[in-house]
């Protein structure tokens, strides 16, 4: 299973649309919050796209849940925006919640800083921001592959996609 993971698009649907057209084949799209109206436009343009999404702190009127726990490829994934866990300060509360949920992968956003980090037997992934990036100015997203060998996650950028294409 291949997962395309984004967060903090903040209404910049043009970049999201460009990513969906250039990223290659994937099985599931995941948005970790602060989407603005991007998910409404996404549903219109890609109605059959399998996806999971949560609301972020900048999505005050969203009907999306703030957290989700689901399984993909036999692995448990905990999805949250991260603001309720103080992720701008440290990851301890998020890691503890991931452990409580027996998650294999925890996906979050909010900081606009990309991160892939192992914590005990759990992997943490923050795809950064596709729209307003901090620390380097790259428009980043996450790419996850789940298979018999486990979970592999990496950070990619739109700039890399441009070079490939």
Image: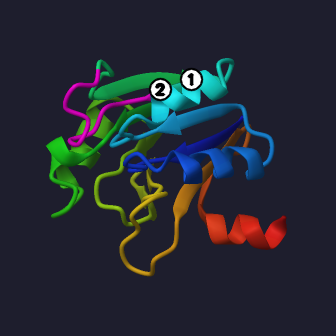
Q: Is mark 1 on a helix, strand or loop?
A: helix
The secondary structure making up most of the magenta span is: loop
- For label 1, the crowd category at 10 Å Cα-Cα, with few meaning under 14, some 14 to 19 and many 20 or more, is few
Residue extent of the magenta highlight? 53-62
Marking on residue 83: none
What quarter of the picture does the C terminus occupy? bottom right
What quarter of the picture does the N terminus occupy? top right
| Rendered location of residue 141, percent (x, y) | 55, 56
Q: Which of 103 and 3 is in front in this view?
A: 3
**Residue 2: quarter of image:** top right
Marking on residue 40: 2
Outermost residue on the bottom side: it is 136
Q: In the rendered structure, are the residues bearing label 1 and label 2 in contact, judged by CB atoms less than 8 Å apart?
A: yes
- For label 2, the crowd category at 10 Å Cα-Cα, with few meaning under 14, some 14 to 19 and many 20 or more, is few
Q: Nearer the viewer, residue 18 or 150?
A: 18
**Residue 162: quarter of image:** bottom right
| Rendered location of residue 10, percent (x, y) | 37, 48
| Rendered location of residue 159, percent (x, y) | 65, 71
Residue 5, above or below 59? below
Give the residue at x 26% y 35%.
59
Marking on residue 43: 1
Residue 150, above or below 114? above
Q: What element carries label 2?
A: helix
Residue 93, above or below 43? below
Outermost residue on the right side: it is 165
Q: Nearer the viewer, residue 134 or 106?
A: 134
Give the residue at x 78% y 73%.
163
Residue 151 included in the magenta stretch of the image: no
| Rendered location of residue 86, percent (x, y) | 15, 53
Side of 151 relative to 36 (left or right): right
Q: Marks 1 and 2, Cα distance to the nearest angstrom?
A: 5 Å
Give the residue at x 57% y 50%.
14
């Amino acid at each position: 299973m291949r997962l395309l993971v984004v967060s903090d698009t903040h209404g910049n649907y043009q970049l999201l649309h460009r990513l969906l057209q250039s990223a290659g084949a994937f099985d599931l799209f995941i948005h970790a919050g602060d989407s603005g109206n991007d998910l409404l436009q996404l549903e219109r343009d890609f109605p059959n796209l399998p996806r999971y999404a949560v609301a972020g702190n900048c999505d005050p009127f969203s009907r999306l849940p703030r957290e989700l726990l689901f399984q993909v490829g036999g692995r448990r994934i905990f999805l949250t925006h991260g603001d309720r866990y103080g992720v701008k300060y440290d990851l301890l509360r998020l890691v503890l919640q991931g452990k409580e949920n027996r998650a294999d992968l925890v996906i979050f956003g909010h900081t606009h800083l990309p991160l892939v980090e192992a914590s005990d037997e759990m992997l943490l992934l923050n795809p950064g921001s596709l729209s307003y990036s901090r620390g380097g100015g790259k428009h980043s997203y996450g790419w996850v592959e789940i298979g018999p060998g486990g979970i592999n996650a990496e950070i990619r950028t739109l700039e890399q996609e441009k070079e490939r294409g």
